[in-house]
Image (tube, rainbow, N blue to C red):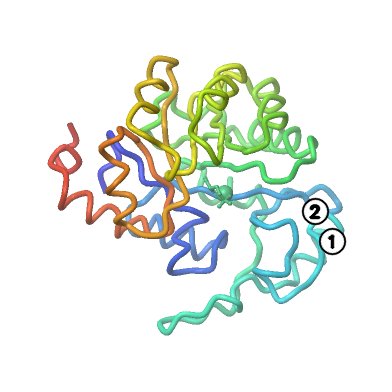
Amino acid sequence: MNTSKFIIVSHRGYSSKCPENTFSSFDLSIQKGCNHIEFDLQLTKDKIPIVIHDDTVNRTTNGIGNVRDLTYKEISYLNAGLWFKTSEKLFTNEKIPRFDEMIERYSKKTHMYIELKSSDFMLVEIVAELLQKRDVLKMSSNDLFEIPNITIISFNKELLKYSKKVLPFVRHGFLSFIADQDNITTANNIGCYAVFPHYLTINESFVPECSERALFVGSWGFSNVDQVIEIIPFGVRGVTVDWPLEVDRIMNKKFDWYHEGS
Ligand code: G3P
Ligand code: CA
C-alpha cells in the first residue's frame, strides 16, 4: 500500500470484514498493509478509556446499557464479535479493547487516529496520561505520512480545544459534517493540523482554501469505492474507509501518481 502522498485510513479497523473496533479488525488492516487505523474512545463508569463507537454497548456487543454506567469489569465480560455476520468467518472471542491495550499492541507500528467520542473532559486527561506514560509521544513522527504516529481527532470542538491545550505538540484533526469556512476557522483557532469533513460536502474550492490556511484535508462517510474516486480530483489527501485494500487497489489502477508515489 502506498501511503507516501495519500493516506487510506481503516475506519474502526478493516470494518467491512471484521467487527468494528476489535483487535481482529485492526490486525487484519495491518496484515493487509494498511497501517493507518482509526478508532473511537468512550469512558466506562470507572473512567477506563475503551474502544467503542456508540455510547451504549447495545449494537456491537451481547450486552445492554450505557458505556458510562458500566464498569470496565462488567464490559470485559461482553462479546464484541457475535453481532457481526459474514459467510466467511465467525468472531466468537472478541472483546472491547482498552486504550492502553491499543497502545501496547499498535503504537509502534501504526498511525493511530484516536477519536475522542465521549464528551467527558476526563477522557482528554486520561488519554494524555497514557500516551505520556507509554512514551508514545516521543515515538511519534512530525510527518503525517510516517509511521509510527498519532493524530487526535474529534467532532467535539471544546474537547478538541482542551486536548490541544493538554497535548500541544500532538497533531489534532477536526471532524465535521460540513466542509465550510466556519469549520476551517474553528480548526485554525484550535491549532489543528487537519480538517476531516464528510466527503459529500467537499467541492473544488475547499482544499485550496484549506491549503492557504495550512490545513491538511481528509474525508470520511463513503459508502463505496466509487465515491472515493469521485472526490480525488478535489485534492483530498486522505480517506477513512471500511475497505482500505479495495481503495488501494482502485487507486493503483486509476492514478499513476498514486502507484509511482510522486
Ligand atoms: O474518522 C471519521 C469517522 O470516524 C467519523 O465518523 O461516526 O464513524 O466516528 P464515525
Ligand atoms: Ca470514528
Task: Give the vertical position of 93 relative to 164 (above or below).
Answer: below
Residue annotated with mark 1: 70
Residue pictured at 60% horizontal, 71% vertical: 94
Quick one: 183 or 246, which is closer to the camera? 183
Q: Nearer the viewer, residue 141 or 16?
A: 16
Seen in the picture, residue 78 relative to 195 is either above or below; the reply is: below
- Dot 2 or dot 1, earlier in sequence: 2
Please indicate whether residue 96 sits to the left or right of residue 252 in the image. right
Relative horizontal placement of residue 241, taking residue 237 as reference (left or right): right
Decide: few, some or many residues near mark 1? Use Cα within 10 Å; few <14, some 14-19, many ≥20: some
Q: Residue at x 79, y 71 (%)?
A: 64
**Viewer-proximal residue among 169 and 103:** 169
Q: Nearer the viewer, residue 35 or 223?
A: 223
On the question of residue 109 being in view, the answer is no
Residue 113 lies, in percent from the top left, at 52, 41
Q: Secondary structure at mark 1?
A: loop
Residue 60: % across, % down: 65, 69
The quarter holding residue 126 reads top right
How far across and down, in percent of the image, does residue 177 sit?
A: 55, 41
Identify the residue position indicated by label 2 in the image: 44
Query: Does 70 sit above or below residue 129?
Result: below
Extreme residue in the bottom direction: 87
Q: Are marks 2 and 1 in contact (CB under 8 Å)?
A: yes
